[in-house]
Amino acid sequence: MTSQTRRGFTLIELTITVAILLVLASASVFAYGSFMNDAKKAHDRTMLPALNAATANYKLEHISSDAFLDPTQTPSALLLLLQTGHYITEIPVPESPEYALAFDFGLQTWTLTSSSSAAVETTAVPAHSLSGSDVTFGTGGFKKYIMSYSGADTNIVIPSLIGDVTPTNVYQDAFRGKGLTSLSFSADTAVTRIHARAFMNNNLTEVSLPPTVTRLDYGAFSGNAIVKVTLGAGVYMEGNVFTNQSSFATAYASGGAGTYLYENGIWSKSVT
């Protein structure tokens, strides 16, 4: 007669088994969490087409007072504007904690950016809106012409009203060599013409011109490393306004209003 010995788990074997089960459980939880986060990101991306469509409808009805042409506007303010105007029923909120909604004023589209980047953006130094102490105006027939800038700020906004004057022209050499890093115009600006060398020799890398601007004189933005330009339709341009002016003029003649990018020495209209 043979005897059989029944052998149980040792403490070491049991510990190893439990450890393996914990590892497998942790991996499952991680995989599930990653899957859910990817799903949230995919859902967030589906918000953009509807949001851009709502913005396009707003812009069509607010051509002369388009808040989306004012870079000083925050994403939350623009979203509230769309909601109160009944272009959207509620303000969308990204499900993924990694995403935040942002508006690209150059491309004029809504985008998703990292929430950490959005937090940094909100603490950035705000643009300085020009006041009467910053600029001088001409006299007589030039009383609405900005003739010179004496301020120290390099990130500026040209508002629709400076003191009691509504500027319509930026005159020759007015902002030349002032170290400007950013330039924008208020949504309700009346500026129609930027004269010769007005913003020459600054540190601008992009510029968004309002649709009211219809003329850019010789060298208006020369001496800047500008690689992105947004402008309206029917703008008359003299020479040397932007780097490689002939390429820009060719692209604009066929593309019209919109945003243009300078890449590999050639200007082309953005299709985004």
Image (spheres, rainbow, N blue to C red):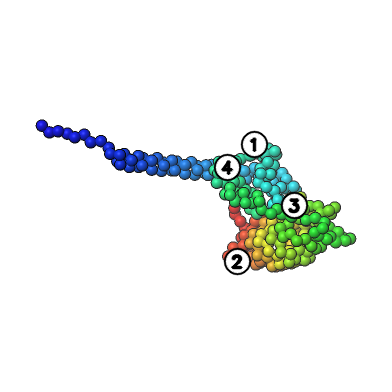
**Which numbered dot is residue 43?**
none
Could you tell me how far apart the alpha carbons at marks 3 and 2 are, in whole angstroms?
31 Å
Which quadrant is the N terminus positioned in? top left
Q: Position of residue 117 (x, y in %)?
A: 59, 51
Name the residue type under label 1. Answer: Thr
Q: CA distance from mark 4 to mark 2?
A: 38 Å
Q: Position of residue 210 (x, y in %)?
A: 72, 54
In front here: 120 or 170?
Answer: 120
Residue receiving disc 3: 186
**Residue occupying the point 83% across, 57% down:** 144
Instruction: Name the residue nearer the viewer: 250 or 116.
Output: 116
Which class describes the residues within 10 Å of circle 3: few (<14), some (14-19), or many (20+)? many
User: Badge 1: few (under 14), some or many (20 or more) residues near its Cα, within 10 Å?
Assistant: few
Towards the viewer: 235 or 70: 70
Q: Nearer the viewer, mark 3 or mark 2?
A: 3
- Sequence-wise, the earlier of marks 4 and 3 is 4
**Which residue is labeled 1 in the image?**
89
- Secondary structure found at label 2: loop
Which residue is pictured at 72% across the width and 48% down the height?
66
Amino acid type of the residue that numbered disc 4 sits on in the rendered structure: Pro
Mark 4–mark 3 Cα distance, whole angstroms, equals 29 Å
Distance of mark 1 from mark 3, alpha carbons?
27 Å
The disc label shown at residue 265, or none: 2
